[in-house]
Every structure is written in structure tokens, then in C-alpha cells.
Amino acid sequence: MEYFTTTGKASRRAVDCVIVGVYERGKLGVGAADIDAAGKGYLKELVRSGDVPNKPGQCVVLTGVPGVRAKRVAVAGLGKHSKLDGTVFRKAVAAAIHALDGSNTRQILNTLTLEPVKDSSPYYLARSSVEVMGETLYRFSEMKSGRKKKPLALSKYGHAIASRGDTSRSALGAQHGDAIAAGVRLARDLGNQPANVCTPSHLARVARKLAAGNGKLTTQVLSEAEMKRLGMGSLLSVTAGTAEPAKLIVMKYKGGGSDRPIVLVGKGVTFDTGGISLKPGPAMDEMKFDMCGAASVIGTMAAVAKMKLPINLNVVVPAVENMPSGKATKPGDIVRSMSGQTIEVLNTDAEGRLILCDALTYSRRFKPAVIIDVATLTGACVVALGAHRTAIMSNNDKLREEIFAAGDAAGDRGWPMPQGDEYAAQLKSNFADMANIGGPGGGAVTAGCFLGKFTDGMDWAHLDIAGTAWKSGAKKGATGRPVPMLSQLVIERSGALP
């Protein structure tokens, strides 16, 4: 894909399509006003007749617009002029791209980047535009036979800018957006693949392939025998019931000299039956998405490597299956974690924390600047926040606020959740140092408190993405979240923002 910027008039650009916007009450956006002037009032007449939408998420594609060199004009609704923010902007871009999907459009100029979007800039508008395009055009059809619908085959995608001084910022935004979109696409592909394809071994192969030929990126994969020698009894207790071997995937991107790395740890349960604490049958197929934490940190690594950011980033993925068998861990069993702490496994379906705690302990060896784990950890998080926001917990208030702000900037929002001794007290066990579950109340928080017991002395945060990692229903599929949030955080820490 080739990205470009232009200060030229929308009506004079000889592309396959120009995207313009119309506000409520017939107010034309910057690009739309130019199109209307070139067409001698043609667009305004359509607005008056009600043939052009003005609500966010709506779009109509016009052809043969007089005075305009573009073959098509996609007119997207922008809603109220006073309420144009990043969310509305993304809806408008998505509506335009969706309306063009299936056409033979190969070159697009987006003039919505000229609109007065609140709290934005040429960098963020171009970046959001490219990310939304990637999200809108995403398809997962590799498992389908027969003829497949061809997606929009774009070769050039441009952004209108107000002045040439905005060129470098807009170009950087498009470059970063392209990398983040690629990371999201990888995360979605991994999540959407069935569990008989996306096994722990498959995740390891993908991680190795990403590192191939990249001098700054390396991948190491530890076997079960190596994990046993390290004392990862908690992690290995989860994989005891399956024939599929567990893997500990360690990726290292070195772009920041001797700086301490950011470490991302992603839960990689490639299928979760619940083990002996078996899940109910309905919707159990969606437990292939229980590795979306792993997919998101691998996707973030792919984005960071493509952006060539000047920073050090490590990714650690404990990858396992959780299956019931005669060898599976039983409720009431006690296991010893790599940290030496013992855990009474009261529920084998609370397995994510059992693999993450050993991965967090392992990550201490990297002396991380910060460590963030990402996991589809609790149904309680879905009850608390639904499918809209990722839960953010941390032992460092500044880090929690930093992640929250990164999510807002990236349009991939989170919400801060508490921690405290009153929640951690629910994890007490009569027989071990702790239990792996607490009571029925505050389930998402007690899960975070469990992980917190393995992060003393580290600046740590926990992201529960159980509600945001995938969608159910007619549009079932992985979302790729929180790749944009994590990428924003790494970009900011690298100093690469314009």
C-alpha cells in the first residue's frame, strides 16, 4: 500500500474515490464544500433532497459528480459539527470504506482529515484512518472452500492536509497506522483460527517466523522439560491433562540499546475446556479465543518491529491447552509455582492465572522497566465492563493512568479497576500459601490480586480483556484488542510521537 498526502483540492484529484463529509443541518465539510463548488451546487441540492446522509456511520457513494475528476465521491455523515471527535471520525471512515468494499476502487483520497476533530492532529487522523481501513476490510476466510469474495484491492490511500507543514506528521501517522493494523490483523487471525490449527506449537511457529530475517528480533521457545527444570509447577499443572505439549515463547526486540525493556506477558490458552471443572457446552467453541492475550502481545510485537521503534520490548507467552483426562489436575490439588509459593487449585477453570504467575516470575530475569500481562481472564470482567472497555489494574497508579491515557489516544479504551488487601484476603487457603480463586464477589479484581502476589518489586499492570478480545453472535470473531492500546504505550515510551 502506498500512502500520500496532498494540499490540493478534492475536486482536482484524479483518483477512484474522494471521501468527504456532511454534517447535520446541511453543513458541508471542507472537502464536500470544494466538491459542491466545482459542481455548482450539485452536492447541496442532494443534501436538501435528503439523498445524502448526515448521521455518523452512514455513507452514500456518488458517481458522475459534475466538475470532479474522481470517479466516485463517498459522502459520509458526520453528525453535529460541535460533537466531531475521534470516535465519530472513525465511524465516518469505516462507513466510507465499507460502502466502497466490493468495488474496483484502487485509489482513495480521504478529506475527512481536514475536519476539526476534537483533541486530534494530522498524525492521529492519518493513523486512525489507516487503522480503521484495515479493520473494516478484514476478512477471515482461509478455512472456507469455494469462491471467496475479493476485498477492496487498494494500491494508494491518501490524506488531505491543510498545509505542507503537516506532511511529515501525517505520513508518520499513516506509517504507524499501517503497522498497527498489521499487528491487529495478525492477532485477529490467530484468535479466529480453530484450536486444532492454532495450538501452542503453532503460536511458537508464528513467533519464530516473525523473527526470521529481523536482526533486532529474536524468538526462543522453551519446552516442557525446560519449564520443569525452572520449577514452573503452576504452569505445567494446567497442561497435565492434554497430549498437546506446552510452550513458553520468549520474543525479544532490541531497538533501544541498553535500556530496560518493556515486558508484555500474554495468556496463551489455545483451548480451554475448564479441565476437570468442565465448562458448560453452549458457546464452548468460543474458548478458542482464550489465547487472545497471547495473540495481542504477539501482534503488538509485530507492529513495533514493523515501526522499527527505538525501544526494547520483550514478549513472553505461556501457551497451553486446558483439557480433562486421567492425568489432569484435580480441584483441591496443590502445586508449587516457580516463585516457590504454593497454590491450592480450587477450580481448574481458573487456569489463566496459573500459567501467568510462572510467566511473570520468569520475566523478572529481564529486569523490566514495566511488565504488563494481558489475558482473557475472568467472566466477572465481562459483567463489570461488558464488551466496551478493557479492565486495567496495577500496583503503580502512574502506570495505570499511563495505560488508560494510551487507550484513549488509540481509540482502544480501558477502565481502571481497584486492588487491595480486602480483595486479596479472599484468596486465603487452609492448605497452601493461596487459593487460585476467591469468593463470588469481585472476581476480576481477586484474579488481579492473585497475579499481584508474583510481582513484588516490579512496576506491573494487568489487562483483563475477557470482554473486549472477541465478539459473539452474528459477527463472531476476534477483535485484535488491545493491540492499538499497547502499541500506543510503546510508541509513547519510545519517544516516536511527532
Image: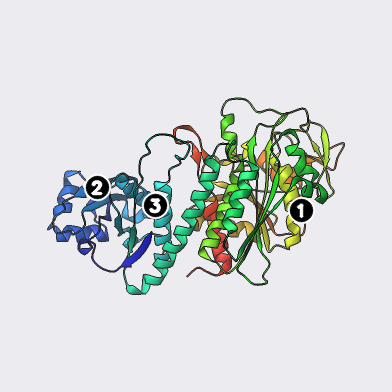
Q: Secondary structure at mark 3?
A: helix
Q: Secondary structure at mark 1?
A: helix
- The CA span between labels 2 and 3 is 16 Å
Residue drawn where x is 57% and y is 68% of the image: 494
Query: Type of residue at label 2?
Result: Val
Q: Quadrant of the N terminus?
A: bottom left
Task: Inspect this view and state whether residue 447 appears.
Answer: yes
Q: Nearer the viewer, residue 134 or 411?
A: 134
Query: Type of residue at label 1?
Result: Thr
Q: Nearer the viewer, residue 262 or 380?
A: 262
Report crowding for label 2: few under 14, some 14 to 19, many 20 or more residues within 10 A (C-alpha).
some
Q: Earlier in the sequence, mark 2 or mark 3?
A: 2
The image position of residue 149, as x and y in percent, is 36, 40
The image position of residue 272, as x and y in percent, is 65, 35
Q: Nearer the viewer, residue 302 or 63?
A: 302
Residue drawn where x is 40% and y is 56% of the image: 130
Q: Which mark is residue 420?
A: none
Report crowding for label 3: few under 14, some 14 to 19, many 20 or more residues within 10 A (C-alpha).
many
Residue drawn where x is 57% and y is 25% of the image: 282
Q: Quick check: marks 2 and 3 in contact, CB under 8 Å?
A: no
The image position of residue 4, as x and y in percent, is 34, 65
For mark 1, what is the residue?
361
113 left or right of 378? left
Query: Type of residue at label 3?
Result: Met
Q: Is residue 11 above or below residue 415?
A: below
For mark 2, what is the residue?
61
Q: Which mark is residue 133?
A: 3
- The CA span between labels 2 and 1 is 55 Å
